[in-house]
Amino acid sequence: MLVVLPAVAVLLVAGGCQKDTRITMSELEDLQAVASAEPPAVVKPEELALADVQPYQVVDGDVLAITLLGLREDRYEPVNLEFRVHDDGTIVFPIVGKIEVAGLTLGGVEQAIVTAHADVVKDLAVYVRLAGAESTTVLVQGAVTQPGLIELPGDQRNVVYAVSQAGGFQMDSSGLVRLRPIRADREPLVFDFNNINDVRRALSAAPLESGDVVMVAAAPQDVVYVIGLVNAPGVVSVPRSGEVSLVRALAASGGLRDFLDPPEATLWRRLPNGNQVRVKLELDKIMNGERPDVALAAGDVLDVPHTPETRFREWLAANLKFGPFGVTAMYDPVADYRARILRNDNNNSTFRQTMLQSLGTGISDIVLPPVVAPITP
């Protein structure tokens, strides 16, 4: 059997001359810094739609408890009244009639009542408190501790309070919150509570309305995918710290395949802006401690690919056998070609049968000539 090793080596080298489009680790760090850069959202407390940082503003449906001093003979004897704010934003007093209070703070309501009674009562003292705020009922679902219908007071009608009233995030929550408004003319919104800018935007968003749905997404399974020249390719779990090192990921995948010693690996990573990049890793230097270990993040794909050298090593390991009398080449080109034809599902079945028949007759006779009996005298 004739085995030409130099020809095999030439073919292996010729197959690995493609242009390398991968980037380096330093280029990856620069791209991630640019993709992650985001100017901070500027939110002034006085511009927040609804939050405890500003005084409560009266809305339609609120119940106001009002105490008045100066109406009775004993000017210090209080008169206690309760009013519900009507749909037009007013309350109606027996003597002065309608007073517009919607949109006012409680202090503003007190001043409006004093002004309305200016021609009737002198030196009127008014104290207003919120006896019952008009609440908004929203549905909170997903990765929260207590999903269900949540009632929100008038000054807490945003997704931050909605998630808090639902018991907060569960351990498997991704921090991603989607708002689906009940009204078709309002746009759905998405907030990432891992991003402080999105928390600011959530606080300053338009108030929730009854019937709105708040959905908290669960985190996908945090894994790294390892493929290529490892003994057990598959997924490797990522701890809650958010990353796992390259060396540990290879160890969890059964280690590198014996005798191949791949010199490099490829890291597939999706950047925060959605772009995906391929990074060249000097695997041999990382494993020898000449380069620092690389931190892999959830969703990364680590590929340990073949190179011409590893393919040649694999071929030698499969076809050379070491014995007591030297090295024996086990390579059978006919069997190899037969196996390639059988593996090629794209070939026509008739063509495969024809080639296999030819392998069983002519070609095999050429490669392995028949044994001729010796001529006897």
Image (spheres, rainbow, N blue to C red):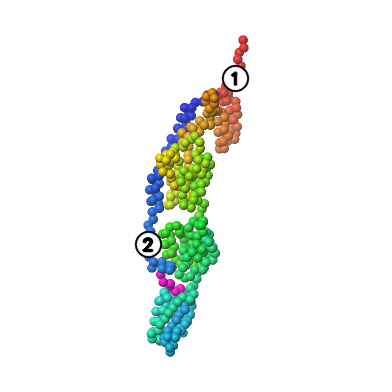
Quickly name the residue at label 2. 42
Q: Secondary structure at mark 2?
A: loop
The disc labelled 2 sits on which kind of residue? Answer: Val
Q: Residue at x 43, y 60 (%)?
A: 198
Main SS, magenta residues: loop
Quickly name the residue at label 1. 371
Give the Cα distance between marks 1 and 2: 90 Å
Q: Residue at x 54, y 64 (%)?
A: 148
Give the magenta range.
Answer: 54-61
- Numbered tag placed on residue 343 in the rendering: none
Task: Return the x and y of residue 53 as percentages of the image width and height.
Answer: 41, 68
Asked if residue 84 can be seen in this view, the reply is: yes
- Mark 1 / mark 2, whichever is N-terminal: 2
Q: 165 or 206: nearer the eye?
A: 165
Q: 261 or 368: nearer the eye?
A: 261
Q: Residue furthest top?
A: 377
Q: Residue at x 38, y 68 (%)?
A: 46
The disc labelled 1 sits on which kind of residue? Answer: Val
Task: Return the x and y of residue 204 as percentages of the image width and height.
Answer: 42, 64
